[in-house]
Image (cartoon, grey):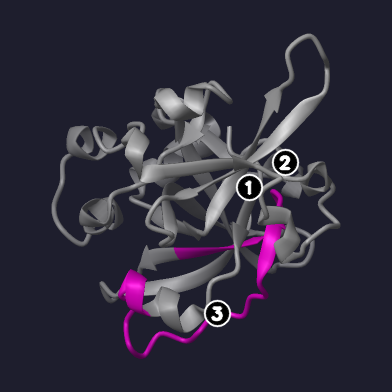
Amino acid sequence: MCGRVRLASDYSEIKIRLKFAPNAPAPNFEPDWNKPPTTPMLVAIRSAHGERVPKMMRWGLLPHWAKDEKIGHSTFNARSEDFTTKPAFRDAWKRDQRCLVVTDGFYEWKKIDGSEDKQPYAIALADTGQMVMAGLWSSWKNPASGEEVLSCTVLTTRPNKVMGEIHDRMPVILDEADWSKWLGEEPATNDELLALLRPCPNDWLKIWPVDKKVGNVRNKGAELALPV
């Protein structure tokens, strides 16, 4: 699973790296080294005009038929092996509502041998660039207020060798060469899209232990990503 990410890069750098449309409004987000589900995530989608644009979306996908936001507490991840048949995700898949979830990396916890205690680790790309994850998004109308809520989920897959030392799942981290295909900017069959949902190469990642205070979502500072 992937249940905690960080994003603190300068938006001007992200805009260049993600190749957002020049006229796309800049999203409003604060640097955050400890983002949990239900908080806003920066994503890239293909607009109705075919442009790549940024959006802030609630982390935890809300399908259009949801009665309230509670389902979002269990839909922040979607398993790449079976998400196309799961009621919460299949409509987004059928409607080509795919997105790129933009992060600086994520955290994962490893059980300490012979103990119920866990050690948190930070995971980032070895080249220190943005870690872009495969996602799905949805538009939901709150039946009480009529407000439109955009939400997203991160697709997960089996771990590569280095992540397998920590956890039995990892997010799908996309190669930059595949971003256009996942967003629908270039043609691809469903089989070609599903083939992208695989573990990234081991040498893409760097992993290091961090302080356990990352386990408290009220902690947000840069010190959370420092090695211990």
Residue 36 visible in the snapshot: yes
- Residue under pointer 1: 60
Mark 3 secondary-structure assignment: loop
Is 33 on the left-hand or right-hand side of 95? Answer: right
- Residue under pointer 2: 73
Is 95 on the left-hand or right-hand side of 214? Answer: left
Residue at screen point 23% across, 51% down:
178
Residue at screen point 30% across, 75% down:
19
Q: Main secondary structure of the magenta part?
A: loop
Residue at screen point 62% across, 39% down:
75
| Part of the protein shown in magenta | 16-43
- Residue under pointer 3: 27
Q: How many marks?
A: 3
In the rendered structure, which amino acid carries the disc numbered 2?
A: His
Q: Are marks 1 and 2 in contact (CB under 8 Å)?
A: yes
Who comes first in sequence, dot 2 or dot 3?
Answer: 3
- Residue furthest to the left: 187
Who comes first in sequence, dot 3 or dot 1?
Answer: 3
For the C terminus, which image quadrant?
Answer: top right
Q: Is residue 39 magenta?
A: yes
| Residue in the foreground of this view, choosing between 196 and 188 | 196
- Marks 2 and 3 sit apart, C-alpha to C-alpha, by 24 Å
Q: Position of residue 14 (x, y in %)?
A: 43, 74
Q: Is residue 63 magenta?
A: no
| Residue in the foreground of this view, choosing between 198 and 38 | 198
